[in-house]
Amino acid sequence: MDRRQRKTRDAIFDAFSELLLHSSYSQITVQEIIDGANVGRTTFYAHFPTKDDLLREMCAEMFAHVFSKALKAEPTHDFSMARGDPMAIVTHLFYHLREHGRMLVVLLTCEQGELFQRYFNEYFNELVTRHILGGSMRRSAVLPEDFLMDHIAGSFVGVVRWWLKNDMEQSPEELAGYFMAAIQPAV
Amino acid sequence: MDRRQRKTRDAIFDAFSELLLHSSYSQITVQEIIDGANVGRTTFYAHFPTKDDLLREMCAEMFAHVFSKALKAEPTHDFSMARGDPMAIVTHLFYHLREHGRMLVVLLTCEQGELFQRYFNEYFNELVTRHILGGSMRRSAVLPEDFLMDHIAGSFVGVVRWWLKNDMEQSPEELAGYFMAAIQPAV
DNA sequence: TCGTAACCGAACAGATTGTTCTTTAGTTAG
DNA sequence: CTAACTAAAGAACAATCTGTTCGGTTACGA
């Protein structure tokens, strides 16, 4: 990709992130993003057809990053991520979210929480299938699989929301414990 | 309240509900609402300062209605709602949501899901405290109370979302079973 | 070095918001 | 029943935002 394109794209992402820390998504105007990024109006629209597209693409990049390690690690080859140790994986995710996901978490509480939920579900399903349900835990005979999937992903997002509400005081380990305890009996 | 006011208010609510069935919240314009309600521009703004206020007030009325019976029933006086039978209460809620909450459910999946989550939490906390946690179930020693509260309310919303995704095929009883099974071990 | 592709800035139409005004019509009190 | 009050209608308004078009400038990469 052309260096100029990458530069513009990053500038827009940064400006947008910055704005998201102080205003809510729907309040932010394209003009503000343009000003913050020092980018021409035409340029912005050459990159992103609408503000929503910007959000979507940014989410995609962030999620890909946060989940990259957890997903790349093949269950059979990585010890710390070994199948059967979902606690380690979940803890890892919380670490990632804390260090890198300051804004992710901001987005989570804004009007676009729905979008996040979808992304989470998408990425999480993969993880859950591979590391949690597939592991040594016993499966519930009562609950349909897709229900279970939604429930677990939703609970994870819920935990993150709760974390944020508490100013992220709890440690990733502690959270992972809560999360597993909350969903434990269901799986 | 002046009959004219009530009439206008209802017309706006109806028009808004109708629009929500076909477009998403952010796409709907005040003009569309005005046209749908056959109401003057001035009149709309006399009732609701912004579109967000309209949504908020409508949510408030709907939630009050959906939860009214469940909350009004004093645990000690109503047999079907007796403390210790949370399953009946939850089933009841799903019934209410299905019959009356067609639009509630639409709203739940739109961008304003966050708003709904807040309302649900608010109303649900009351219910949970009174009928579920306070009942005969054993309490988890591991999980903080507010965490548990958020988790349960979040799970309920999650179930409703899943229900909607499946075109509300499942019966309220079935859903209540799923819901209780999912949160069972946590409480 | 040269052509191409990205960027800039200004200006534009179109749509939306929220306000102000005057006129009309319904409601309530005396 | 009438008079005073209150709400609604409708038109017109400025202000803002969106998304596009155009010509000119700059930077990349072959």
Image (cartoon, coloured by chain):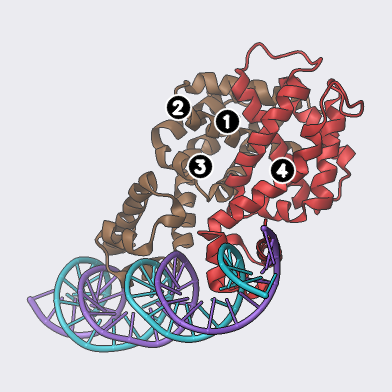
Chain colours: A red, B brown, C cyan, D purple
Q: Which chain carries label 4?
A: A
Amino acid under disc 4: Ala
Give the chain letter at badge 2: B
Q: Quickly name the residue at label 4.
A: A64
Relative depth, front residue between A176 and D20? D20
**Badge 2: how crowded within 10 Å, few (<14), some, or many (20+)?**
some
Residue projecting furthest to the top: A141
* Residue type, numbered disc 3: Thr
| Spatial separation of the CA atoms under disc 4 and disc 1 | 27 Å
Q: Name the residue under label 3.
A: B109
Which residue has dot 1 on it?
B159
Q: Are marks 1 and 2 in contact (CB under 8 Å)?
A: no
Residue A83: quadrant of the picture: top right
Q: Is residue C27 left or right of residue B32?
A: left
**Chain on which label 1 sits:** B
**What amino acid is found at the position of numbered circle 1 in the picture?**
Val
Which quadrant, please, contains the N terminus of chain A?
bottom right
Residue B168 - label: 2
The CA distance from mark 4 to mark 3 is 24 Å
| Disc 4 versus disc 1: nearer the observer | 4
Q: Is mark 2 on a helix, strand or loop?
A: loop
